[in-house]
Amino acid sequence: MSALSTIGSRALIAGVLAAGLTVSGAGLAGAGSVNVTVTGARNDNGVVRCGLFNSPVGWREPGKQFMKAEGKVAGGKGTCAFANVPEGTYAVALFHAEEGERQVTFNVLGMPKQGVAFSNNLSITFGAPGFEKASFKVGKEPVNMSIKLIY
C-alpha cells in the first residue's frame, strides 16, 4: 500500500470517528428526518455510530457533525435516526463499533479494522468520498436510506 493510500485511509476514518452516542440537535426547527438502515455488519456485536454532516466544511472531521446517532446491531443490521433535521443538504459517515470503540482502529496497512460507510454507498477504494458525492437533500418528507458497511 502506498503512503498516499495510507493517508487516504486515515482521512477516511477521520469522518467516521465523529460518529457518537446519541441523537443531538433536538429542539431545532426541523423540517424532516433522516433514517439510516445500516446493512452488511459482519456480526451483531456492538453498535453502528453515525454522523450527519451539513457542510463540506468539517466533513468527516471528528466533532464537526451536525448530529450524531448510534444503533444496536442485530441480524447484521443497525439503524441510526436523526429527527428535526432542517431542510438542506447533508451527508452521512458511519462505522461499526463492534467492541464499543469511540473511533476506528487500523491494521498494519493503515486500513480500518471496522466496517465503514458513507451515504450514497460510495466506494472507498481511492479514499473517502467528498461531501458533494456523499450528499443528499432533506426536505419536509422523511429521508430513508440503506447504507452497506465496507470491511
Image (tube, grey):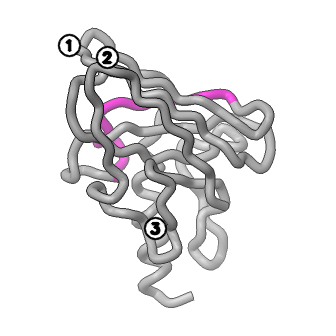
Is 82 one of the magenta-colored residues? no
Q: Position of residue 19 (x, y in %)?
A: 46, 40
Disc 3 element: helix
Identify the residue shown where x is 29% and y is 55%.
131
| Residue farthest along the top direction in this orientation | 27
Q: Nearer the viewer, mark 2 or mark 3?
A: 2
Residue 29: which numbered mark, if any? 1
| Residue plotted at (56% across, 40% down) | 146
Circle 2 is placed at which residue position? 84
- Would residue 116 be found to the left or right of residue 68 on screen? right
Q: Earlier in the sequence, mark 2 or mark 1?
A: 1
Is label 1 in a helix, a strand or a loop?
Answer: loop
Give the residues in magenta. Answer: 60-72
SS class, disc 2: strand
Amino acid type at image mark 1: Ala
Tag 3: residue type?
Arg
Marks 1, 3: nearer the viewer: 1
Label 2, label 3: how far apart the Cα atoms are: 31 Å
The answer to whether the residue labelled 2 contacts the one labelled 1, judged by CB atoms less than 8 Å apart, is yes
Give the residue number, with chain letter if any, for mark 3: 10
Residue 114 in view, yes or no: yes
Estimate the x, y position of residue 97 in percent, counting from the top left: 64, 43
Quarter holding the N terminus is bottom right
